[in-house]
Structure formats: structure tokens, C-alpha cells
Amino acid sequence: MLKTPLLAIVCMLVASVFGAVGQYLYKTGADRSDAGPVVMLLSPWILAGMGCYIAVMLLFTQAFKAGGTVTVLYPIYATTFIWAAIIGQVVYGQPIRLVHIVGMVLLIGGMYLMGVGNAQPS
């Protein structure tokens, strides 16, 4: 089995958190603005969301530089959906129901299988 460096995995996990935070910053910026799209881009919330996505791209680059591959690391980045649900509950009071937890478990299982399946030499 091919080894994925721990640094690459950590970079992708941190990137997934930044990706989820960025989405909620965009949502907050959109909710607080009644301006047009161009003016809305100057909102501190939108600018902070953009900063999160710059951080995501820097972390992607570092993960690949550390020796990770897209097929192994991208399923790890998919945990963004889980972080988004947690942020939604904490910040917006959006409930996480049993059906959501089942979906998260299925996502994690699928991500694991994709990563392991792609890590096997052909």
C-alpha cells in the first residue's frame, strides 16, 4: 500500500475546516447585505470567506508537495460537509438529526473506502 504522509492528511483536514468556515462566512455576509454583488464583495464577512479559501488552496498545495495524491486526499477534504453541519449547529442553531449523523457515517465510510481503494497499487 502506498503511504500518505501525515502532514498531507493534516493539511487536508485543516483545509476542510477552513472550507466549511468560509461557506458560513459567505452566508453571513450575504445575509447581512442588501447591496449588489460587487459591493457585497467588500463586506468583511465575504473578504474573510475569501481568506479562508486562499488558506484552503495553500493547504492543498502543501499537502500535494508533501507527497499526497488527489485520489487519496480529496476524500479527506470531503469532511467539509461534516464541519459545515457542526458549524451550522453551533453558530445558527441548525439541528443535527439522526438522519444527518447516519449520512455523516456513510460519508466517512465512503471516504475511507475511496482513499484506501486509491492507495492500493494496481
Image (spheres, rainbow, N blue to C red):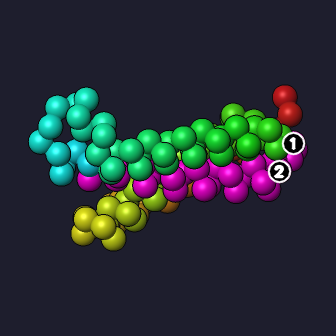
> In whole angstroms, how far apart are the C-alphas of marks 1 and 2?
10 Å
Magenta span of residues: 1-28
Question: Residue 52 or 111: which is nearer the viewer?
Answer: 52
Q: Residue at x 51, y 53 (%)?
A: 18
Question: Residue 98 or 4: which is nearer the viewer?
Answer: 4
Q: Quadrant of residue 71?
A: top right
Q: Residue at x 18, y 49 (%)?
A: 31
- Based on the picture, tell me whether residue 99 belongs to the magenta stretch: no
Instruction: Name the residue beneath numbered marker 2.
Output: 5
Say few, some or many: other residues with alpha carbon within 10 Å of mark 2 (under 14 / 14 to 19 / 20 or more): some
Tell me, for residue 120, which label it has, or none.
none
Query: Is 89 left, or right, of 11 in this rendering?
Result: left
Q: Position of residue 51 (x, y in %)?
A: 48, 46
Q: Residue at x 40, y 65 (%)?
A: 86
Q: Residue at x 68, y 52 (%)?
A: 11
Q: Position of residue 45 (x, y in %)?
A: 33, 51
- Based on the picture, tell me whether residue 2 belongs to the magenta stretch: yes
Question: Residue 73 or 21: which is nearer the viewer?
Answer: 21
Tell me, for residue 2, which label it has, or none.
1
In the figure, 122 relative to 2: above or below? above
Say few, some or many: other residues with alpha carbon within 10 Å of mark 1 (under 14 / 14 to 19 / 20 or more): few
Mark 1 against mark 2, which lies toward the viewer?
Answer: 2
Give, as a three-letter code, the residue at label 1.
Answer: Leu
In the figure, 84 relative to 56: above or below? below
Asked if one can make out residue 63 in the rendered structure from this viewpoint, the answer is yes
Give, as a three-letter code, the residue at label 2.
Answer: Pro
User: Under tag 1, what secondary structure?
Assistant: loop
